[in-house]
């Protein structure tokens, strides 16, 4: 739990201050504190702090004239869970990757067999770097052990899809952004292994949209159900349940502030890498804008 204070200082303004002073904002008395609360906090924090200051504002009119007294009131609000913090921190990067022309072509059913195959080659390579590291580290890193499940390993699915669509990876098909990120994954596994949770968050989260890409790819490439799209929709009807379980297990891990920051930074970095890979695919296949 984090303690926040709603404070009436000597000067005519309001503040809601986090205990460590990391978020402070002034509000003119004519505005009332709720206006700033609504734009500063989200989710459980907004509900808790917003209810608190709204009650004060509506039930205690003397707050409007207590300009010369130092009044501090405290309220405890739930700390944002790591899964929510990850979602907030990566929202813009997620949207940017999601709207990339190469991604839009797959979602819109306009990707060719070669384009889809090239995408699978990149994903298979990423998992080929990530999964051995996870298997090696899981015994020694409690957070990885608490989250990782067999169905999170998808390299075999990507390779099976490549065979199903008849795409033989070429020696020069691995893109530079893919190679660079593989090197980054190896560095993280050596120096900051818990950060790999952030990478897994992005890759596993992508399965939520993967089912829509799969539904578009199959008719375009004349693929039967369940053939050639196992990487995109590995969980089938268990998708929602497994994604919920993943987020819950992430939130259950006991991580320091520094470790949480590393996980979030790695998730952001993964979205950046995915975007660069999509850029590379776009350039390689000379894709027109979606």
Image: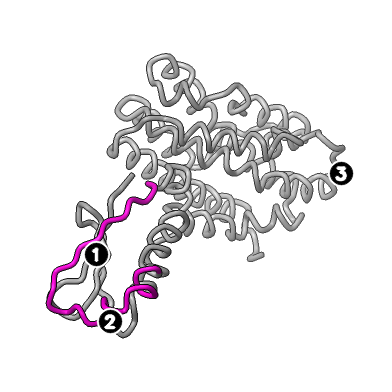
User: How far is disc 2 from disc 3 in space, using C-alphas?
Assistant: 64 Å
**Residue drawn where x is 47% and y is 56% of the image:** 43
User: How far is disc 3 from disc 1 in space, using C-alphas?
Assistant: 57 Å
Q: Is mark 3 on a helix, strand or loop?
A: loop
Give above or below for 136 relative to 247. Answer: above
Which residue is labeled 3 in the image?
Answer: 222
User: How far is disc 1 from disc 2 in space, using C-alphas?
Assistant: 16 Å
**Residue drawn where x is 58% and y is 37% of the image:** 123
Q: What stretch is highlighted in magenta?
A: 55-79
**Residue drawn where x is 49% and y is 18% of the image:** 135
The residue nearer to you, when weighing 8 against 129, is 8
Q: Which of the two discs, 3 and 1, labels the residue nearer the N terminus?
A: 1
Which residue is labeled 2 in the image?
Answer: 29
Magenta span includes 117 = no
Q: What quarter of the picture does the C terminus occupy? A: bottom right
Residue 24 marker: 1
The residue nearer to you, when weighing 246 against 227, is 246
Q: In this view, does 3 lie to the left or right of 85?
A: left
Q: Which of the two discs, 2 and 3, labels the residue nearer the N terminus?
A: 2
**Residue drawn where x is 50% and y is 52% of the image:** 275
Mark 1 neighbour density, 10 Å: few (under 14) some (14–19) many (20 or more): some
Q: Which of the two discs, 1 and 2, labels the residue nearer the N terminus?
A: 1
């Amino acid at each position: 739990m984090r303690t926040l204070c709603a404070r009436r200082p000597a000067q005519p303004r309001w503040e809601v201050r986090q205990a460590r002073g990391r978020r402070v904002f002034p509000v003119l008395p004519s505005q009332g504190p709720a206006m700033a609360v609504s734009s500063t906090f989200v989710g459980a924090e907004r509900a808790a702090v917003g209810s608190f200051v709204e009650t004060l504002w509506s039930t205690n009119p003397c707050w409007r004239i207590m300009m010369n007294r130092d009044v501090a009131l405290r309220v405890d609000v739930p700390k944002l869970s790591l899964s929510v913090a990850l979602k907030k921190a990566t929202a813009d990067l997620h949207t940017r990757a999601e709207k990339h022309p190469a991604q839009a072509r797959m979602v819109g059913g306009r990707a060719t067999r070669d384009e889809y195959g090239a995408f699978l080659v990149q994903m298979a390579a990423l998992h080929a770097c990530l999964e051995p590291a996870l298997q090696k580290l899981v015994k020694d890193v409690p957070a990885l052990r608490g989250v990782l499940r067999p169905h999170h390993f998808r390299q075999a699915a990507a390779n099976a899809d490549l065979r199903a669509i008849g795409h033989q990876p070429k020696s020069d098909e691995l893109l530079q952004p893919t190679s660079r990120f593989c090197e980054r994954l190896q560095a993280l596994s050596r120096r900051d292994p818990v950060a790999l949770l952030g990478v897994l968050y992005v890759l596993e989260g992508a399965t939520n949209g993967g089912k829509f890409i799969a539904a578009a790819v199959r008719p375009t490439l004349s693929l039967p159900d369940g053939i050639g799209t196992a990487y995109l929709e590995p969980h089938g009807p268990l998708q929602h349940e497994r994604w919920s379980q993943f987020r819950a297990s992430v939130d259950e891990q006991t991580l320091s502030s520094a470790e949480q920051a590393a996980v979030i930074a790695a998730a952001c970095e993964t979205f950046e890498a995915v975007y660069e890979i999509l850029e590379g695919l776009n350039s390689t296949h000379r894709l027109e804008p979606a």
